[in-house]
Structure formats: structure tokens, C-alpha cells
Amino acid sequence: MKKNFALIAVLLILVIGCAMAKHRSQIREGMLVTGLNRNAFAKEWGLPDRTATMSSDEFSSFSSGFNTYGGRASYFRGKTSLDVWIYEKWDVTLVFSGLRLVGWKTSKSREELKAISGQR
């Protein structure tokens, strides 16, 4: 029983590690897509200059100002609190639901976003 638990734990750690490496790679390449893990942003870009929160209602009503993959806003059940990370020095705002990226606002191109990882 203990061997099975240890094997499952090792496999889980490997899967999580691979997913995090993929997310970090996408961030380094300047590819913002919904679902990226916020810890990957912290490791690539460092901690944000400011943080805030917004409600999912507020995000849905203002989502036209935020980019989301496919141009569609994420819809939430009920009223959910979302974390907002603001990188003032790079003019990037990220919105997370838990650990998942759900939207962002920036005027930066992919190449400009790609350069952020090198500026840290």
C-alpha cells in the first residue's frame, strides 16, 4: 500500500512539473493563453508591482477591455473573487481565478511580452 502511494505521489509530481515547465515556456515565448498557472508568471516575471481583487461580475461586465483566449470571457458560477496582478513597469494586467489565468490587458505585442522574461 505504501509503495503504491509513493508511486502515485512521484507520478503526480512529474505531471505537475511538466505542466509548469510548459506554462513557463509559453510565458517566455510571449504567448498568453487562458489557463496558465500564476506561479509560472511569478517564476518568469517575478512578483507583480501591485495586486488587487475584482468580482467575476465586474470582470464579465468589463471583459471587452481584457483579452481572453478566443476573445470570449470566462463565465463563473455565482460571484467569485478574482486576483488581479499588475505589472506597472511593463503595462501588463493579469486576472486569475485561483491559480488559472482567465484574462489579461496589455498593449504589448508578443515580441514585447517575450522580452519581459529577459528583463527581470
Image (cartoon, rainbow, N blue to C red):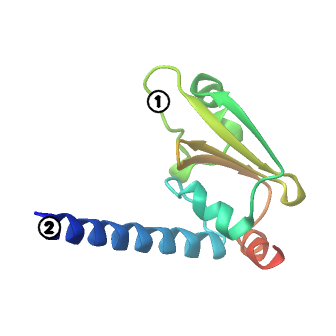
Can you give x and y, in whole percent of width and height, for residue 13 in the image?
Answer: 36, 69
Q: Residues within 10 Å of mark 2 (few under 14, many from 20)?
A: few
Three-letter code, disc 1: Phe
User: Relative to the observer, which residue lies in front, 118 or 104?
Assistant: 118
Say the numbered circle drawn on residue 38.
Answer: none
* Residue at (74, 74) in percent of width and height: 117
Can you give x and y, in whole percent of width and height, for residue 72 in the image?
Answer: 52, 42
Three-letter code, disc 2: Asn
For residue 71, side relative to residue 44 (left or right): left
Q: Earlier in the sequence, mark 2 or mark 1?
A: 2
* Residue at (53, 57) in percent of width and height: 37
The image quarter containing residue 4 is bottom left
For residue 13, side relative to residue 102 (left or right): left
Q: Is mark 2 on a helix, strand or loop?
A: helix
Q: In the image, which is nearer the foreground, mark 2 or mark 1?
A: 2
In the rendered image, which residue does mark 2 sit on? 4
Q: Is mark 1 on a helix, strand or loop?
A: loop
For residue 79, side relative to residue 104 (left or right): left
Can you give x and y, in whole percent of width and height, for residue 21 in the image?
Answer: 50, 74
The image quarter containing residue 38 is bottom right
For residue 73, side relative to residue 46 (left or right): left
Alpha carbon separation for disc pair 2 and 1: 37 Å
The image quarter containing residue 108 is bottom right
Q: Quadrant of the N terminus?
A: bottom left
Q: Is residue 117 above or below residue 5?
A: below
Q: How crowded is mark 1: few (under 14 residues within 10 Å), some or many (20 or more)?
A: some
In the rendered image, which residue does mark 1 sit on? 76
Q: In this view, does 106 lie above or below 81?
A: below
